[in-house]
Image: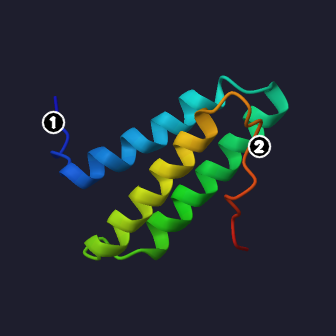
């Protein structure tokens, strides 16, 4: 059985943030849940492609920004994402 490579601390934080968004999306209305999941997935995939893995300052900035957005999304009065926009 092949073992998986160990994840760095930042990689673990990114995955935890991603899972946090998906868990929080489950608490919203079904149509908004799909929209949140779609936007979050697109944003994370775009950053995975465009951000250099060695640019820790930028990655930490994105983590801080994501944590703030997640905390806002957890508020029951917030129905969806308005500030997270995927650039096309």
The image shows residue 43, relative to residue 22, as above or below, that is: below
Residue 24 placement (x, y as % from top left)? 59, 30
Residue at 74% x, 31% y: name it: 77
Task: Depth check: give the residue in front, 48 or 3.
Answer: 48
Quadrant where the C terminus sits is bottom right
User: What is the distance, in whole Å, between disc 2 and disc 1 at their CAs?
Assistant: 35 Å
Which residue is disc 1 drawn over? 3
Callout 2–callout 1 Cβ contact below 8 Å: no
Residue farthest along the top direction in this orientation: 27
Q: Position of residue 19 (x, y in %)?
A: 47, 35
Mark 2 element type: helix
Residue located 50% across and 50% down the image: 68
Q: Residues within 10 Å of mark 1 (few under 14, many from 20)?
A: few
Image: 24 above or below 65: above
Q: Of circles 2 and 1, which is in front?
A: 2
Residue drawn where x is 15% and y is 45% of the image: 6
In the rendered image of this protein, does residue 28 appear above or below residue 6? above
**Which of marks 1 and 2 precedes in the sequence?**
1
Label 1 secondary element: loop
The residue that mark 2 highlights is 35
Relative to 14, 36 lies left or right: right
Rendered location of residue 60, percent (x, y): 33, 64
Q: Is residue 56 left or right of residue 16?
A: left
Left or right of 85 in this view: 2: left
Q: Looking at the picture, how far across and down is residue 21, in whole percent?
A: 55, 38
């Amino acid at each position: 059985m092949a073992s998986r490579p160990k994840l760095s601390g930042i990689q673990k934080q990114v995955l935890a943030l991603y899972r946090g968004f998906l868990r929080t999306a489950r608490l919203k209305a079904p149509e908004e849940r799909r929209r949140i999941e779609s936007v979050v997935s697109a944003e994370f995939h775009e950053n995975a492609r465009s951000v250099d893995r060695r640019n820790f300052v930028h990655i930490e900035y994105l983590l801080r920004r994501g944590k703030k957005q997640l905390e806002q999304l957890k508020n029951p009065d917030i129905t969806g994402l308005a500030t997270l926009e995927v650039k096309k």
